[in-house]
Image (cartoon, rainbow, N blue to C red):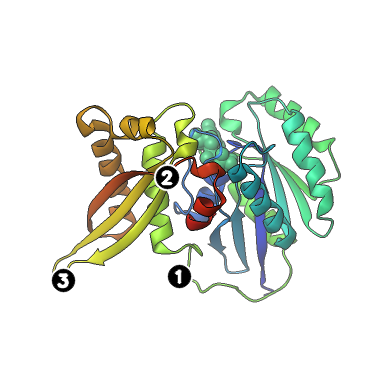
Amino acid sequence: MTHRSGFVTFVGRPNAGKSTLMNALVGEKVAITSSKPQTTRRAIRGIVHRPDAQVVIVDTPGMHKPRTLLGKRLNAVVQTTLGDVDVICLCVPANERLGPGDRYIDQQLEGFPDARKVALVTKVDVASRERVAEQLLEISALRDWDAVIPISSVAGTQLDVLLDRLAALLPEAPPLYDAETSTGERLDDRIAELIREAALEDVRDELPHSIIVTVDDIVARKGRAITDVYANLWVERDSQKGIVIGHGGERLRRIGKDARLEIEALIGQQVHLDLRVKIAKEWQGDPKLLGRFGL
Ligand SMILES: Nc1nc2c(ncn2[C@@H]2O[C@H](COP(=O)(O)OP(=O)(O)OP(=O)(O)O)[C@@H](O)[C@H]2O)c(=O)[nH]1
């Protein structure tokens, strides 16, 4: 049997469902997701193992016109990723009309002539059959795709069809990762992301973009099945600190508890989470701070 392996990435507007799709294909939460746009900040790898193929999925931030230095850096992450992959899938949600944002991203794909290109109409579970059909026609008109596939990550619709197509588009090569590996992410980065996810779901408006999480230390307690995690949740301004902490510390406790449960599920052990809220003044526009945060 021939074995294929290679890299696939999903591009699309913020909130198109890219991270959710990667998790559904990998079968594990390797990327956090949220209803807030621009959740993904790094190129996160998730690995799908099959007997005949290994599909390495690189999740990228959503592509958009940048407004901050952070936005510019996120776009740069996307550009670098696209230059390195075998297949690029453009994701367009079925429940939103194809717009200038999608066309802009489609045009960007011209810069990567060597990659195979697939169009995905996502979230078909929340659109009528007519709408899905319409969207398939519109996206088909954009270019000569290697495949056009309607899918739903939430309902699990056509994910097997998608994986078959992706595997077939990859070059013949031996596996790149060993069979146990589901992600290229480090444990501290995964934990920081789980804390950020818990915080994102709990705050409104522009605050999600201002939040970043760092992990100082992960320490297994001697002789006990419990791990101490020391983490910081950074915001940009004093007023935001108050919002995250909440009335009498209520919101921070809730975020901490939600995050702790997710971290426990990840490491399979009881966790004590020490979470501090700190201020990194206007970090989204500060090159030094962005560098310190690894962005
Ligand atoms: N109904 C439905 N909702 C979905 C589906 N896929 C994703 N979503 C929802 O759409 C929202 C955005 O999903 P994400 O996977 O975070 O989107 P993304 O494209 O990675 O977003 P960015 O990180 O902002 O680029 C979340 O609330 C998901 O639950 C789907 O197949 N069906």
Residue lying at 79% horizontally and 45% vertically, measured from the top left: 108
Q: Amino acid at mark 3?
A: Lys
Residue lying at 65% horizontally and 30% vertically, measured from the top left: 94
Q: Amino acid at mark 2?
A: Ala
Q: Nearer the viewer, mark 1 or mark 3?
A: 3
Q: On the image, numbered disc 1 is attached to which residue?
A: 180
Q: Position of residue 45 (x, y in %)?
A: 55, 59
Examine the rendered structure and indicate whether residue 283 appears above or below residue 295.
above
- Position of 37 compared to 271: left or right? right
Give whichever of discs 1 and 3 has the lower sequence position. Answer: 1
Give whichever of discs 2 and 1 has the lower sequence position. Answer: 1
Q: Residues within 10 Å of mark 1 (few under 14, many from 20)?
A: few
Residue lying at 47% horizontally and 38% vertically, measured from the top left: 210
Depth order, front residue of 217/13 = 217
Q: Which mark is residue 280?
A: 2
Quadrant of res 106: top right
- The span from disc 1 to disc 3 (Cα, nearest Å) is 27 Å
Quadrant in the picture for the N terminus: bottom right
Q: Amino acid at mark 1?
A: Glu
Q: Residues within 10 Å of mark 2 (few under 14, many from 20)?
A: some
Q: Which mark is residue 148?
A: none
Please report contact status of discs 2 and 1: CB closer than 8 Å, yes or no: no
Query: SS class of the residue under badge 2?
Result: loop
For the residue with label 1, is its CB less than 8 Å from the closest atom of ligand 1?
no
Q: On the image, numbered disc 3 is attached to which residue?
A: 222
